[in-house]
Image: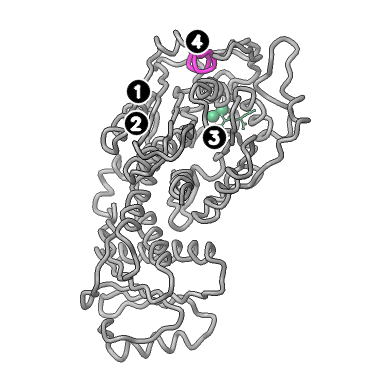
Amino acid sequence: MITIKKTSNPVKGSNLAIICEKFKNKPTYHFDNSVTEYITKQLSDPDKKFVSLNHLGQLIYVIIIDPKKDINKTHEGLRKNGSSITDAINGTKGKHLTVINETAKSSHSLALAEGLALGNYQFIKHKPSAKKGANTFESVSIIDSRLKDEQISKLNIVVDATIKARNLVNEPVNILNAQGLADAFKDFGKSAGFKVEVYNKAKITQLKMGGLLSVNAGSVDEPTFTIMEYKPKNARNKKPYVLVGKGVVYDTGGLSLKPTPNSMDSMKCDMAGAAAVGATMYAIAKAKLNVHVVGLVPATDNRPGFNAFAPGDIITMMDGSTVEMLNSDAEGRMILADALHFAKKYEPELTIDLATLTGAAAAAIGQYGIVSMGTAAERHTNRLKDSGHRVHERLAEFPFWEEYDELMKSDIADQKNIGGPYGGAITAGKFLVKFTNYPYYHLDIAGPAFIAGKDAYRTKGATGVGVRLLFDFFSNLYK
Ligand code: BES
Ligand code: MN
Ligand code: ZN
């Protein structure tokens, strides 16, 4: 992982990125006249906002900021600039970059550094032949006198946590099953300082978590239910925030086997919600935020094994209600329902779930945002939406009208686990809300969790979506 730190003077000849409103040469840059002339000439074109050059092996970048532009857009542009600079540095086997921020806002250097660090991510642990092609970029030094140490350490933490989430999601099910996921959360708890308890199948059975057990019925691996709790002495909230993450470590669809070619290929990503919850717990504990948060993760794979739950089955859930299970590929809601019921005992201030829940959410808005809905008050949801804009993990709120409730009704049980052909992301949310009695917000991350190709600092495969969103949300709660 790239480390980000503060410094006061650029080392002569070190790779350099200068962020400014208008370029003005300074002696501290140690530029030859030819370099200054080249940059000035390039910037004589008023549309030119990014200059890059390689001067005898030294990479030099000048990024022009427009202070009138929307700040969130500027930050996202800087993250993307960061990612392309990272590619160039690795392309020349470089190790370091110094960032000089000449603008009025220190957030500009943080955004650039975030893009640099996240864009450097690689998942090559299972590819010995790629060792030679491994990234060489190691550290970023920022020159920006207004930057506080706390801002730098928070940035390092959230980058680290996002990478941890990506690593878990990219790991296939033959290497990381439900138990492996729970073990990873135990490690997070140990290294960041929060409590982790893992329920095994016997305990899950004793608690009558019928939804989780039904999905697990076709599996040879046992399910797990992980409870993470971070409760600092200086917590500002009386009632905890509860995070729930879908932990389907692999989704074949079960007996309702995923039908279309390639539709299963990326289904190791079906625990991206769980990974985001675990990594967020890690980040808030590492950063010692003053908020009490509980994280819950029900986990299992979903397979068509001998005793797999069968379409038509009637399942009694942990809350005692019944579900006519008509499609075993709508498994996420079955395991989440028990976790949402379990959350009631905390009397949460707010419960947020993150789940790669429906293809319908991905079909509706693609990889560019999170589909959201729920019953939480605006004072909560507005904060989440603001965080979404700040970190560019934007929320697209879907309607939660009562008409959709009708679609989940069953003649022989309290609910069905599928709705009609339309509004699939919403009917899934409608199913889940029945298991809540507290302010609730549902985040369907099926679109952005796992991407087919690199999108700047969102590298190919797992993106770690949700971690930066929630860390920003909790960081700004009591400001
Ligand atoms: N894990 C899938 C949703 C998914 C799709 C995640 C694409 C990531 C990318 C989920 O369990 C699922 O299969 N949902 C079904 C629900 C349907 C059967 C009601 C779907 O969306 O088709
Ligand atoms: Mn499924
Ligand atoms: Zn699934």
Q: Tell whether 105 sits left or right of 183.
A: right
Local secondary structure at mark 4: loop
Residue picked out by circle 4: 208
Instruction: Looking at the image, tell me whether mark 2 or mark 1 is earlier in sequence order.
Output: 2
Mostly what secondary structure, the magenta segment?
A: helix
The disc label shown at residue 350, or none: 3
Local secondary structure at mark 3: strand
Tell which of 56 and 407 is nearer to you.
407
Q: CA distance from mark 1 to mark 4?
A: 18 Å
Q: Tell whether 252 sits left or right of 260.
A: left
Callout in the foreground (2, 1): 1
Residue 123 drawn at (x, y percent): 34, 45
Residue 70 drawn at (x, y percent): 56, 67
Q: CA distance from mark 2 to mark 1?
A: 9 Å
Q: Quadrant of residue 474?
A: top left
Please name the amino acid that badge 1 sits on: Glu
Residue 275 drawn at (x, y percent): 42, 36
Tag 4 near tag 3, CB within 8 Å: no
Which stretch is magenta? 209-217
Q: Residues within 10 Å of mark 4 (few under 14, many from 20)?
A: some
Q: Residues within 10 Å of mark 2 (few under 14, many from 20)?
A: many
Callout in the foreground (3, 1): 3
The disc label shown at residue 197, or none: 1
**Residue at the image point whose x is 34% and y is 31% from the top:** 185
Residue picked out by circle 2: 185
